[in-house]
Amino acid sequence: MSSGSSDGVAVVLVAAGSGTRLGADLPKAFVRLAGRPLLRWALDQAFGVSADNELQRVVVVAPATHVRQAQALLTDKEREFVRVVAGGAERSDSVAAGLAALADCDAVHVLIHDTARCLAPAELFDRVLAALRGGDEAVVPGLAVTDTIKLVDKAALVTGTPPRASLRAIQTPQGFTRGAITRAHAHGAQATDDAALVEALGLPVRVVPGAASAFKITEPDDLDRAERLVRTDARKGAR
């Protein structure tokens, strides 16, 4: 990990979700996948960012009730550059808290990642960063949509059918220049997607290819899917 480059990277891991839809009796970040909390999986994936990208700091935004539990997941070495802060009532509040924890960090690129997408591969982080280093101010990974999508009104009547070729299912990590994401969150607006706040500034957002493994763990079936994927990868690694 780098601590002095003026062109480094910071990662904000949003881990303040309740876990209600998972049917868990604890915050989602602490639900176990193959014996390890989702947050620990997400940390390990973030640490896999290539050395060329000079990871300077990781900020974990945890539920206010579980800050100590998040800190307990860190090794002594990780505590030197990982900070754990309490999240807010809404996702945008939590991201803003994570960005505030970068005040004394000079990283110019920020990746914002949902812990619920804890199996996003390290190469996905690098892909987003490569586009940022290529000159984009905002970059998100996305997958082509295979289902037909309908727009509906409040009465559930169809108002349009957008062409699938123009649609992407957006994932995280989402990457931004420090200036762009700071400006986007400056007004306290709420959104489930940080790129939407940047779009509101009138800045272009680049979409790069996503990864199938970066799906979001929200429902019990998603956790089962993640368990199967981890078991399959483990068997491949044992060969």
Image: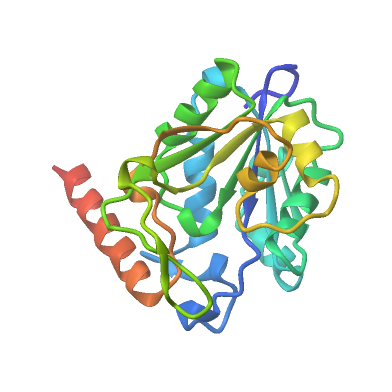
Pinpoint residue 38: horizontal percent, then vertical percent.
Answer: 49, 61
Which colour assignment does the render follow? rainbow
Pinpoint residue 6: horizontal percent, then vertical percent.
Answer: 75, 17
* Residue 123 appears left or right of 7: left
Q: Quadrant of residue 86?
A: bottom right
Q: Quadrant of the C terminus?
A: top left
Q: Quadrant of residue 230?
A: bottom left
Q: Quadrant of the N terminus?
A: top right
| Identity of the residue drawn at 53% across and 42% down | 173
| Identity of the residue drawn at 69% across and 17% down | 7
Pinpoint residue 192: horizontal percent, then vertical percent.
Answer: 62, 58
Pinpoint residue 233: horizontal percent, then vertical percent.
Answer: 24, 49
Q: Is residue 214 above or below residue 183?
A: below
In the image shown, does 21 or 143 lie closer to the viewer?
143
Q: Is residue 128 above or below residue 148?
A: above
In the image shown, does 161 or 49 lie closer to the viewer?
161
In the image shown, does 189 or 149 lie closer to the viewer?
149
Q: Is residue 44 above or below residue 17?
A: above
* Residue 99 appears left or right of 151: right
